[in-house]
Image (tube, rainbow, N blue to C red):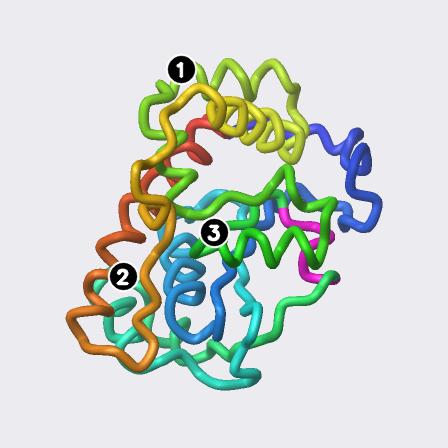
Amino acid sequence: MLDLDLSGLFDHRDERSVAPTIQILTVCTGNVCRSPLAEQLLRTRLRPLDVAVSSAGTRALIDKPMEPDAAHLAAQLGVATDDSAAHRARWLNESHLRTPDLVLAMSREHRRDIVEVSPAAIRSVFTAREFERLARDVPEAEIRTTAEAAGTNPHARVRAVLDLLASRRGQLEVPADPFDDDVIDPYRRSWETYQLSAAQLLPAIGEIVRVLRATFA
């Protein structure tokens, strides 16, 4: 593991606590289906990296638990049942966007809403499927080289890698169907829709995990 130097911790996030923890925020609408599933999958699959994952909703069903079908999917995908049971929805606000190193929206609409709440967050916001599209052809060696060039500060390493991915927005062909960057909302829909939503999300989760592991390899 890296011997992390925290001397530059406050370079661009003055309100971040003095800790190496990388913070990820996942965002959907109600914060009861897609974003908690993404949150819990990332938390499970990024262990033992020093990463904290949370979620919120742009129109959250405040204090509501995770939808049963979403929790069932989470359990099928290896998330501890206690993690899903502890979830309570919260409404996204500007304070939630001050410290995350990476913000993952479940749709392009959520990405727009996030930037409206906090314009300063624009550099760290991707839709989950957009992240997957931008990252899938980037070799791990290039990710490691980019991270190493940024030094040992963990936040600077993530920032450099996200900048690398963001630079590909102008290089790659935009999806013919813009909805290809969205994860379908399964709320109050069929079990099959929940399964489709998870199937759209899982490749993105895989790429996010791959990129972050390479960042700290």
Q: Residue at x 54, y 17 (%)?
A: 146
Q: Position of residue 118 (x, y in %)?
A: 72, 53
Q: Is residue 157 visible?
A: yes
Q: Amino acid at mark 1?
A: Ala
Q: Relative to 53, is 137 on the left or the right?
A: left
In which quadrant is the C terminus drawn?
A: top left
Q: Is residue 67 above or below residue 22?
A: below
* Marks 3, 1: nearer the viewer: 3
Taking depth in this image into account, of 20 and 67 the one nearest to the observer is: 67
Taking depth in this image into account, of 137 and 144 the one nearest to the observer is: 137
Q: Relative to 88, is 191 on the left or the right?
A: left
Q: CA distance from mark 3 to mark 2?
A: 15 Å
Residue 98 is one of the magenta-drawn residues: yes
Q: Residue furthest front?
A: 176
Q: Amino acid at mark 3?
A: Arg
Q: Position of residue 56 (x, y in %)?
A: 56, 67
Query: Bounds of the magenta span?
Result: 95-100
Crowd band around label 3 with a 10 angstrom C-alpha radius: few (<14), some (14–19), many (20+): many
Q: Which residue lies under the disc numbered 1? A: 141
Q: Residue at x 62, y 31 (%)?
A: 159
Q: Which residue lies under the disc numbered 2? A: 197
Q: Is residue 135 above or below residue 65?
A: above
